[in-house]
Image (spheres, rainbow, N blue to C red):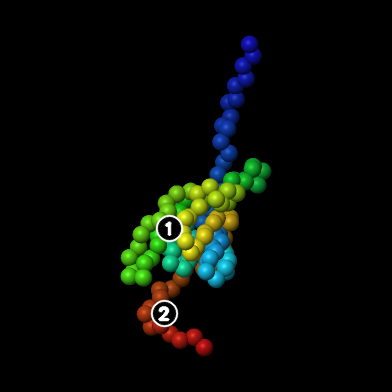
């Protein structure tokens, strides 16, 4: 009997990324929006607040398995929040752990090292006056 033993690890190396790219569908307007979110930043898409906690890819020499661990909360009209999803999403299988919401669909597109969006740590504070300022 011949046995073959591997001394190397069978796990592919993962790359932690600071930015997750999502697409979101508003089923009422049929509008698809693509947006970047930094890890541990919370953004609002419609009535949903999305917070990615980890976003991983693999080296370009490996089979890509892009994944994100996210928390999704729904904000009610009264301002209360209800957690509707906590878990992993996979870019190559968006329906595997889909967010089940009657108005919005959200799926992972990619994880990346940089974004055109200013990182939260470099943004200035939003004052009530600036938030309420009219735009022309």
Decide which of 56, 87 is in the foreground and name it. Answer: 87
* Residue 6 horizontal side relative to residue 70, left or right: right
| 127, above or below 75, in the image | below
Decide which of 23, 84 is in the foreground and name it. Answer: 84
| 87, above or below 118, in the image | above
> Is residue 19 at least partly visible in the picture?
no
Residue 45 place in picture, x, y as percent: 48, 66
Quadrant assignment for the N terminus: top right
> Secondary structure under badge 1?
strand
> Is residue 84 at least partly visible in the picture?
yes
Foreground disc of the pair 1, 2: 1
Residue 135 place in picture, x, y as percent: 49, 86
Decide which of 64, 44 is in the foreground and name it. Answer: 44
Residue at 42% x, 51% y: name it.
86
Mark 1 → mark 2, Cα distance in angstroms: 24 Å
Instruction: Say how many tags the image has.
Output: 2
Which mark, residue 72? 1
Residue at the top extreme? Answer: 1
* Residue at which label 2 appears: 131
**Do the CB atoms of the residues marked 1 and 2 lie less than 8 Å apart?**
no
Residue 60 place in picture, x, y as percent: 65, 47
Residue 54 place in picture, x, y as percent: 48, 51
Picture quadrant where residue 63 is located = top right
Decide which of 5, 42 is in the foreground and name it. Answer: 42
Residue at 43% x, 63% y: name it.
49
* Residue 82 horizontal side relative to residue 30, left or right: left
């Amino acid at each position: 009997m011949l046995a073959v033993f591997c001394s190397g690890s069978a796990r592919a190396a993962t790359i932690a990324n600071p930015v997750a790219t999502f697409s979101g569908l508003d089923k009422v307007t049929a509008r698809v929006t693509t947006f970047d979110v930094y890890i541990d930043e919370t953004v609002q898409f419609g009535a949903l607040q999305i917070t990615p906690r980890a976003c991983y890819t693999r080296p370009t020499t490996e089979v890509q398995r892009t994944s994100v661990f996210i928390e999704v909360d729904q904000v009610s009209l009264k301002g209360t929040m209800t957690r509707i999803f906590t878990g992993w999403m996979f870019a190559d299988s968006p329906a595997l752990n889909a967010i089940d919401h009657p108005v919005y669909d959200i799926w992972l597109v990619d994880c990346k090292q940089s974004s055109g969006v200013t990182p939260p740590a470099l943004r200035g504070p939003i004052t009530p006056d600036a938030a309420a300022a009219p735009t022309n």
